[in-house]
Image: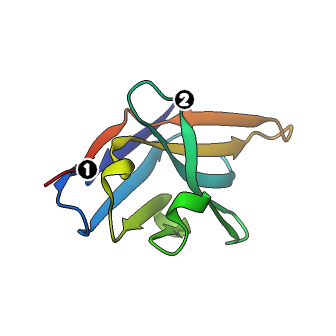
Amino acid sequence: QVQLVESGGGLVQPGGSLRLSCAATGSILPIKSMGWYRQAPGKERELVAEIASTGSTNYADPVKGRFTISRDNAKNKVDLQMNSLKPEDTAVYYCNVVMWDYARREHDYWGQGTQVTVSS
């Protein structure tokens, strides 16, 4: 069983910064990718940023240049540094980890979500 433990959400003023962290624990298989998604009220869940096992990264256009994703492979941990936050960044942020089993099948795991609110 795999658990994803998230931390770091909260309330911040526009222009401020927050750092989200997610650690995977339990029966860890080889990790294909780690990432962050978000879901605002009335909207679908969307990709924010992801980082592959190779270290390559992918960012959603609205966060490019403001958010930075990083991972610590030894600790099975992924962080999301969010700078220059805007009210439209307000959402529940979810950690996502994709793992391969020994037959190379992919398995998706999700964190419980952490609220990020950007407001003055």
Q: Secondary structure at mark 1?
A: loop
Image spot of residue 21 (x, y percent): 36, 57
Image spot of residue 70 (x, y percent): 50, 70
Question: Is residue 5 shown above or below 108?
Answer: below
Three-letter amino acid code of the residue under disc 2: Glu
Residue drawn at (32%, 63%) of the image:
85
Residue drawn at (70%, 71%) of the image:
56
Quick check: 103 left or right of 19? right
Q: How many marks?
A: 2
Quadrant where the C terminus lies? bottom left
Q: Which residue is mark 1?
A: 9
Image spot of residue 39 (x, y percent): 45, 35
| Marks 1 and 2, how far apart at CA | 19 Å
Three-letter amino acid code of the residue under disc 1: Gly
Q: Nearer the viewer, residue 34 or 105?
A: 34
Of callouts 1 and 2, which one flags the residue occurring earlier in the amino acid sequence? Answer: 1
Question: Is residue 29 shown above or below 68?
Answer: above
Residue drawn at (42%, 63%) of the image:
79
Q: How is the image coloured?
A: rainbow
- Number of other residues with Cα within 10 Å of mark 1, as a class: few under 14, some 14 to 19, many 20 or more: some
Q: Nearer the viewer, residue 95 or 4?
A: 95
Residue drawn at (85%, 41%) of the image:
104
Q: Which residue is mark 2?
A: 44
Q: Secondary structure at mark 2?
A: loop
Image spot of residue 9 (x, y percent): 25, 50
Quick check: 72 left or right of 82? right
- Number of other residues with Cα within 10 Å of mark 2, as a class: few under 14, some 14 to 19, many 20 or more: few
Rendering quarter of residue 17: bottom left
Q: Is residue 61 visible?
A: yes
